[in-house]
Amino acid sequence: MNTPSDSQFPASQFSASQFFDGAESPSPTVNILIVDDEPRNLAVLETVLDDPGYRLVRATSGEEALLALMAEEFAVLVLDVRMPGMNGFEVAQLVKERRKTARIPIIFLTAYYNEDQHILEGYGTGAVDYLHKPVNPSVLRSKVAVFAELHRRGRALEAANRLLLGEVAERRRAETRLSELNESLDRRVMERTRDLEQSEARLLDAHRRKDEFLATLAHELRNPLAPVRNAVELLKRAPGDAKRVGWASELIDRQVRSLSRLIDDLMDVSRISRGRIELRREVIALNDVLADALEAIRPLAQESGHELAVLLPDRKLLVDADRTRLAQAFTNLLNNAIKYTDTGGRIELGVLVEKDQAVVTVRDTGIGIPPERLEDVFEMFSQVESAISRSRGGLGIGLSLTQRLVQMHGGHIKAQSEGTGRGSRFLVHLPLSKADLPVAAPVATAAPASATAALRIVVADDNVDAAETLAALLSEMGHEVREVNDGEAAVQAAAAFDPHLVLLDIGMPKLTGYEACAQIRRQPGGDRRLMVAVTGWGQPQDLQRSQDAGFDRHLVKPIDPQVLGPLVEEVAARVRPPRAQRS
């Protein structure tokens, strides 16, 4: 039972912030049980003991305290002596009788002084301390802190003991296993040594290939840059020479396309290796696929002075394939034949039928393949010539990419050669389709379009050269263009300029392209603008992220003018005024 002096501790003797002075790094939280029948006393105790390392649990009676002790583990029990019903001594007696709670330190609190029989009774029931009210907050905090830390260390020691016992048990099991394996140890050591030697050889070969690939990549990237740089210098020196300007422009366009193909090949290999390429299959004529490949390589074959012989069957052979990807595979094979055949050679493309398969053969009179290299020509970064002596160009990924594309179509590819200097032959086996060729839908004849309407366009890219050249190209097409170099400026330009078309780079300062797109969409009329992401990122997940951000299109740098023109025309068609109806 409490007296007026039990009601609260003097608030002027402490502040909550005092406890945190000089605090060390955070320790695991421990539970502290505070028991008092007066709620205001409990509130004061909670203020005194407020600490991020403590979880304070309150009880207003002895019975409630015992229930809490049965449910949870506590580091310290702060217990009022005088309580109605079950007093503190009775609670302590029951606590010490239970094995689970017998070791919990108990700090008694009382408002009565000089009652030796109570003090002795308290210590007799297992108390570790006996404090008189009003209690000095610093004293109570320090005593609780000592027992809380002892509890933490006890738990840590128990955990360490369990870990140690586990390690001892594991060591004994390991010793048992080791003794059982001693008889076969020599054999296993020999096997492991052999495996390590083979792994080391593979690692050294992979390291060599990586070095050769990096050297080749640097070479292949620099090769187109040299003529581009020379052409730019010529343009500076002869700006009024139309013939030279035309020649330099064609050269730059050709070399940029070469760089783009190089990067596309690298990205395709990456996508295939991660299973990110999905084929868009349809039943198509194999001759049409081969015609696409021939169209792609014909200029290179003519430039190299090769004779190109094509022997295709009259009957239509149908395959279930992705036309673009399968044509890419045959283009790689033909490019490879042209590249490894000296000027004036002969390239042959033929098709045979074996049972239910079409066999496409690409034969050349080039440098051939040594017998020992026939098995690894399809490995990544593999080339017949060494990295230093090769003069044919390329990264050594074309055949690997071709093999994977053919395999994705359910076929296989094989290399044949009678040796160095005796040419080579590649045979591609593809399953024939039993389905009929779909009937093409009639093509609607479009009415001739009027001249493209002048558009308002915002171009945003932190690469100033990229932004300026794209803006200049669009201006040459007759459009009004605002060029900016960060995301915030793009949002401001869109608000002031009210563009029909917005071309946004993704990785810009201040606001990313995604953030800028979202803000522009929220502007008045923002839903009517065509938003186009222009970026070097072209993976499927990048396209999906652009779509999620609100973009209508996703273009991968460098933008092909043949893609840009139709895109601008599409926007212009939306804003072009309708033709007047004839009366």
Image: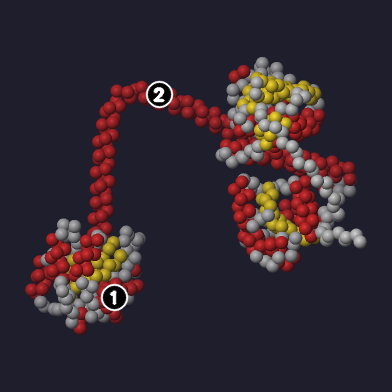
In x, y percent, where is residue 318?
70, 30
Q: Is residue 396 visible?
A: no
x and y percentages locating residue 400 in the rendered image? 62, 31
As displayed, is residue 14 above or below residue 150? below
Residue at position x 80%, y 30% in the image: 303
The residue tagged 1 is 43
Q: In x, y percent, where is residue 22?
A: 34, 66
- Residue 231 placement: quadrant: top right
Taking the view exactly as shown, the residue that stands out farthest to the bottom is 4
Residue type, mark 2 in image? Glu
* Secondary element type, mark 2: helix
Q: How many marks?
A: 2
Secondary-structure class at tag 1:
helix
Name the one closer to the observer, 532 or 169. Answer: 532
Outermost residue on the left side: it is: 117
Task: Tell me which residue sits at (65%, 65%) in the image.
Answer: 522
In three-dimensional space, the C-alpha distance between marks 2 and 1, rounded to whole angstroms, equals 72 Å
Q: Amino acid at mark 1?
A: Ala
Residue under the point 33% across and 73% down: 16
Residue drawn at the location 36% of the way across and 24% of the way down: 188
Image height of 34 relative to 382, above or below: below
Residue wearing tag 2: 191
Q: Residues within 10 Å of mark 1 (few under 14, many from 20)?
A: some
* Mark in the foreground, 2 or 1: 1
**Above-or-below relation of 278 to 453:** above
Task: Using the rendered image of the protein, determine whether residue 247 is visible from the camera's viewpoint.
Answer: yes
* Mark 2 surroundings within 10 Å by alpha-carbon count, few (fewer than 14), some (14 through 19), many (20 or more): few
